[in-house]
Image (cartoon, grey):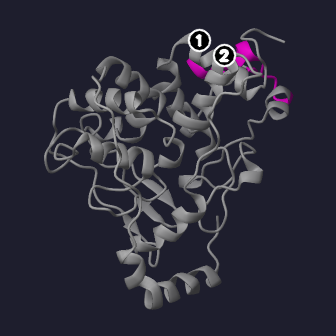
Amino acid sequence: MRRSYSILLGFGALAGLGGATLALWPIGKAPELAPREGDAQRGAYLARAGGCIACHSDPGSGRPALTGGASIKTTFGIFMPPNITPHETAGIGAWTIEDFARAVRQGVAPDGDPYYPAFPYAFYGQLSDQDIADLWAAFQGVQAQEVTAGANDIDFPFNLRFGLKLWRAAFQNGPPTEPLPDRSETWNRGRWLVNGLAHCGACHTDRNLVGGRRPDQYLSGSDDLPDGGKAPPIRPDDLREAGWTVSALAFGLKSGVMPDGDTFGGGMGEVVRQGTSWLTQDDREAMAAYLLDEDTAGDE
């Protein structure tokens, strides 16, 4: 997503003329969570499926897990996934569960500032109160760590967070996840995972000049990922042309092995290692069934 001079001018004008108004514009809403007991084990599973472990950990750094991930280099600047252990100052230990729900489902920090869309909150908006309670229980159960990966280094004018409020108005909604009555339970489970928690469209969808996903290009691939990466199209016809079947794709999400015998590399390799390989076989088959638009978990 290349930034044009006109985009820069537009953000500059925004900063000069409307910044004060936008800075005062409240976003999001206070969540009303029904009281419930969180299941830390299920929450850990959801955290794996949602990419929390992969994004907020950097095994090569020597830092403990969940204390901040590797830098995400984009054309807008460098994003640093933060510490999400329950440390009072370095992590999220000072948050309430309501703060957590608002951050995850709405992309709004406890102080009311918007999060950058490097955090794929648009895909988490469908998480239920029970999902939130389970995730919260899981993160509260890890050891607090007073260490961070560092701060963002975002280019001007994108470092002006109030501009994200306009971005949110246009692009904050994720793809649909609600079940369709004429499709199988397996297919609908896959739809919930692919379009929601697993946020496949965050990488496999092309984006516009300001980083918004292009709905008409959903899952059609992207050649402008962070660090110069690329993601192939994963629509049903594209997957079949590449040799995928439901069982092969479910196996690929477990092992990282592709139909030609090669293995996933780069970002997708990390997704498998830190995410999908930890899922149940049923969930991997559900994702494959949805992506290939098949209502059975077996081969065609």
**SS type, badge 2:** helix
In which quadrant is the N terminus drawn?
bottom right
Give the x, y percent position of residue 89. 14, 51
Q: Which circle's residue, 2 or 1, is located before the other in the chain?
A: 2
Q: In the visual, does 199 lie left or right of 111?
A: right
Q: Amino acid at mark 2?
A: Thr
Residue 287 vertical placement versus 108 (above, below):
above
Q: In the visual, does 20 lie left or right of 86?
A: right
Say if residue 243 shows up in the picture. yes
Give the x, y percent position of residue 73. 48, 57
Give the x, y percent position of residue 287. 64, 23
Q: Residue at x 53, y 54 (%)?
A: 227
**Residue depth check, mark 2 versus mark 1: number of the one nearer the observer:** 2
How many discs mark residues in the rendered view?
2
Contact (CB < 8 A) between labels 2 and 1? Answer: yes
According to the picture, the residue beneath numbered tag 2 turns out to be: 186
Task: Indicate the quadrant where residue 38 lies.
Answer: top left
- Distance Cα–Cα, label 2 vs label 1: 8 Å
Q: Residues within 10 Å of mark 2 (few under 14, many from 20)?
A: many
Please say whether residue 258 is one of the residues in the magenta stretch.
yes
Task: Indicate the quadrant where residue 111 lies.
Answer: bottom left
In which quadrant is the C terminus drawn?
top right
Please say whether residue 171 is one of the residues in the magenta stretch.
no
Q: Amino acid at mark 1?
A: Asp
Say if residue 84 shows up in the picture. no
Q: Residue at x 72, y 20 (%)?
A: 289
Give the x, y percent position of residue 163. 47, 73
Front residue of 230/30: it is: 30
Q: Residue at x 53, y 26 (%)?
A: 272
According to the picture, the residue beneath numbered tag 1 turns out to be: 282
Query: What range of the chain is rendered magenta?
Result: 241-260
